[in-house]
Image (cartoon, helix red, strand yellow):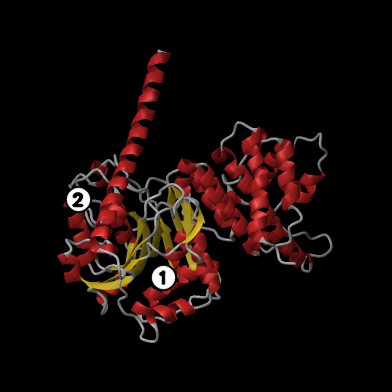
Amino acid sequence: MAVDLQDLSRRLFQAANQLWTNTALRPDQYAQPVLALIALRQMEAKFDLVHAELAETFTGRLKPTPLDYHGHGAVYLPDNARFSYLLSLPETEDLAEALNEAMKGITENNPDLAGVMPQGYGSLPDKVLRELLRILQPLDIGGDAYGVIFEYFMGEFASAYMQKGGEYFTPSSIVKLIVEVIEPYHGKILDPACGSGGMFVHSADFVKRHHKTPSRELSVYGIEKMEDTQKLCRLNLAVHGLSGDIVVANSYYEDPHQMVGKFDFVMANPPFNQSQVDTERLVNDAGTVDARFSLGIPTVNNANYLWVGLFHAALNDTGRAGFVMANSASDAGGSERELRKKLVQSGSVDVIISTSPNMFFTVTLPVTLWFLDKAKAKGERADEVLFIDARHIFQQVTRAHREYTPEQIEFIGNIVRLWRGEQVETEQGSADLMAKTFGEEGFRDIPALCKVASRSDIEAQDWSLNPGRYVGVAAGEQMDDVDFKERLEGLQEELEVLNAEAARLQDTIAKSVAKVLEI
C-alpha cells in the first residue's frame, strides 16, 4: 500500500508540534533536533540496505568498517544510534542523553558530518521524543521520501517562526521553477546565500528526473553566514544523499570558493534590500573594486545590485544563473539603473519572470526571478530578453500562501524552452495548456503572459527589467490599472524595508539601554 507522504508528514509534524505546546522552546530552537531524527531514520534505511549487501562479501570474523559503508554511499551507524536500540531503552532511561550519545557516535564514525549532528536533546521532553521515534521507526519508504518529509518540516518551521524561517528556507515551488529554467544537467553549482540548501537538493532532483546520478553530475558549493543554518544545509544534503563544500562565511567580504569565472550554475535567494554593507571593504588599497562585484558598487544603501554583480561574476563563459530579486530592483533608478544597463548591454540577461504575491512565508509582496546566461551573449539571442508575467499563475494553498503546481512549473519552463528552441516537456501534464496557449506555431508573444524584448526596447523603457512594462495586458484590462498596482507594490515594499530597519534599530536601542542599566 502506497504511503501518503503529505499525510505522514502532517502527522509527524503534529507530534513534533507538541514540543512547542509543552515546552518554552521556540520552533527555531527545536527544529534542528527534530530534523536530525528524520535524517537519522533515513540514514538507517540506507545503512540497512548497504549492511545486507556487505554481509554477502564479509563472512566469518571479518567485519565491514565505517569506510566500507561510506564507499557504498551510506552513513555508518554504531549500535547505539539505531532506532531499535533507542526504542528498546526502558522508560526510566534518559532518552535525551541517549540521543546525544547517538549523535556523538555518528559524528565520530563519519567525519563528513563533523559539527552537523545536534547535541541539544537535553532540553526536550522524553515523552515527545519517544513518540517521534515510534512514528518514524516502522516506516517502509524510499530514501527520496525522507527528503520530502524533511522539506515539509522545514517549510512548516519557516511558516511557524517566520523571521527565522525566512533566513534559511525558499519555498520549494520557487526553487523548482528556478531549476526548471537554468537546467543544471551537469557541472559546478554555487549558492552564495545557501540557507538550508534547497537549491542544491532540487538541482539533484532535476538530474534524477533526467535519468542521471546527481553525485556524478553535480559538484555543490555553498556559502552561509549563520553557522546553525550551515549545519542544517549539510544535514539536508546528507538526507538527500549529497555532499558539498558548504562554508560559513559572509559573501560580501569573503570568497572561500574563489568564485570569479568558476561556476556553471549560480542559484540564490539573497536577502532583499539589505542595507549597512561596508562598501569600503569591497575596494582594495589601490582603489580597485573586488572582481566579484563585476557590475560595480551602487551609491545607494542597498545591496541588491551587489548580489546581482556577484552572481554574474561567478559564472564561467557558458554559465547560467537563476535568483530571486525584490521587485524594486527591476526599476531602481540612479546608480542601480546604470549597473542594470551594464548588465543588459553584456547580453547575458536571459529571462525575467514576475511572480504572484504570497509565494513566500516571510514576504507578502510579489518578487521577480532573474536568469542570466553568459553563453547567450555570443549567440543569436544576445540582443533579446524573454519577459514572463506569471503573476496570475498560482495555486492557492491557504488564505495567505500560494505556490506553483508541477504542471504550472513545467508550463512556465516550456515557455522558456520554446523560446530557446529546445524540446518541451510534458511529464507533469502541461501538454493541454501548452496547446491551448501556443498551438502548433511554436513560440510567440502572448499579451499579458510573455514577450521577447530587444535591447533597444529595454533602453526605451529606461533599462527596466519589469515584465509588466513589456508583456502588455489581457483583454479588458487597462494599462493604467497595471501601473497603479506596480506603484502601490513599490510603496508597500519600501514600507516593509523601513519597518525592518525600524525593528533593527529598536533592537539595538533596547540592547544599549539594557547595558546602561547594568552599569
Which percent across, then down, holds residue 513?
A: 37, 19
Quadrant in which residue 88 is drawn: top right
143 sits left or right of 354 in the view: right
Q: Which residue is mark 1?
A: 412
The residue depicted at 29 percent of the width and 74 percent of the height is 376
Q: Which residue is mark 2?
A: 288
**Label ID, residue 135:** none
Q: Nearer the viewer, residue 373 or 387?
A: 387
Instruction: Report if residue 209 is visible in the image.
Output: yes
Label 2 Cα crowd, 10 Å radius (few <14 / some 14-19 / many 20+) = few
Badge 2 marks a residue whose secondary structure is loop
Which percent across, then down, holds residue 259?
A: 35, 58
Badge 1 marks a residue whose secondary structure is helix
Query: What amino acid type should be assigned to the residue bearing mark 2?
Result: Thr
**Between discs 1 and 2, the one toward the N terminus:** 2
Q: Nearer the viewer, residue 448 or 318?
A: 448
